[in-house]
Amino acid sequence: MVRRTSHGELWSPSLVGLANFAKERSLYYRDLYADLEIDDKTPWHAVPTVQHSTYWTSSKDEGNAVRTSKVFDGILFKTGGTTGNEKYAALSQIELQQTAMQLAQGLVAAGVKPGDRVAKMFYAGELWGSFLLHVLSIMSCPIPLVQIPIGGLGSPDTNEHLLRDCKATAVLSTVTGLIRLADYMLPHGRTLPLIRNVMFGVEAMYPGQCDKLSRMLPNATFRGCIYGSIDAGVIGESASDEDIRVYRVLTSTVLLEICTDEEGREVVDANGVEGFLIASSYIRRLTPAIRYPVGDRGE
């Protein structure tokens, strides 16, 4: 449960334990919090934000100073972080299972229905997370779904054939992958009328792209399948049919702050005020992400 203190700061008792756990077990957080005693009287904005340069320098697979233990189980993913440079993120087995459950919740919020035939067109292999994570999310979904694992590397003609032949009713894909398919199909006047739900991820969808995809997918609605990153974890689920930019924060597993400064010293507490997004994941304990700048802006 997240509550407000008498000073108005957002605070969750679990964050106190998480921050002190990281301080005790992680050399990086021990150094970051060296001059700070963290308890339930500590204003959360007084807890330092992660600096990406030092965080990722300390996150090399050998001699990793951010992790709270050695990697005994789970998975390694590749991430560009917010800098575009290749890095590796580790999730424990339980964190991977919890992430799959978060993503499954996101699929339901994005409108999947029992019996949907879900074509996954994310990229697989090379330690990318989106395809594998959504294999697990569909397996974890509380409603029955059929998986159609197309992937993201096929040619447009192959993808069109598989979507038709397998009678896909829903699609998980990057926006650029769908645009590439539309650029191939639309000049020939072909559409995919069976698909009624498009759940995009990894990148944003802009109005012009949505207009083009609506011509290829005349019966589909468009929603983000999830908002988050490999770095900071799952943050939000789709919250609006009318505005695909709107996400609902998963407050049971993450605290998301909107701050006027990248150091997180001033938290926005009003609608319509844009700021930097800073996330604290309750479930990331192997590689904690506490007051981690997401790299995006929002309001």
Image: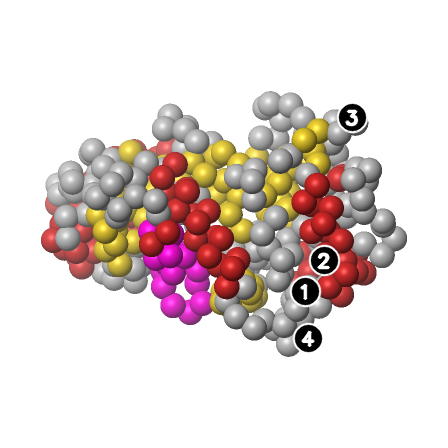
Please tell me how crowded label 2 is: few (under 14), some (14-19), or many (20+) other residues with Cα within 10 Å.
many
User: Which of the two discs, 4 and 2, labels the residue nearer the N terminus?
Assistant: 2
- Which residue is rendered at x = 45% and y = 67% of the image? 127
Alpha carbon of mark 2 to alpha carbon of mark 1: how far?
A: 7 Å
Mark 2 touches mark 1? (CB < 8 Å): yes
User: Which of the two discs, 3 and 4, labels the residue nearer the N terminus?
Assistant: 3
In the image, what residue type sits under mark 4?
Answer: Gly
Between 266 and 210, the one lying in front of the other is 266
Mark 4 touches mark 1? (CB < 8 Å): no
Q: Quadrant of the N terminus?
A: top right
Nearer the camera: disc 3 or disc 4 = 3
In the image, what residue type sits under mark 1?
Answer: Thr
Alpha carbon of mark 4 to alpha carbon of mark 1: how far?
A: 11 Å
Q: Which residue is mark 3?
A: 6
Label 1 residue SS? loop
User: Which of the two discs, 2 and 3, labels the residue nearer the N terminus?
Assistant: 3
Q: Which residue is mark 1?
A: 68
Q: Which residue is mark 2?
A: 22
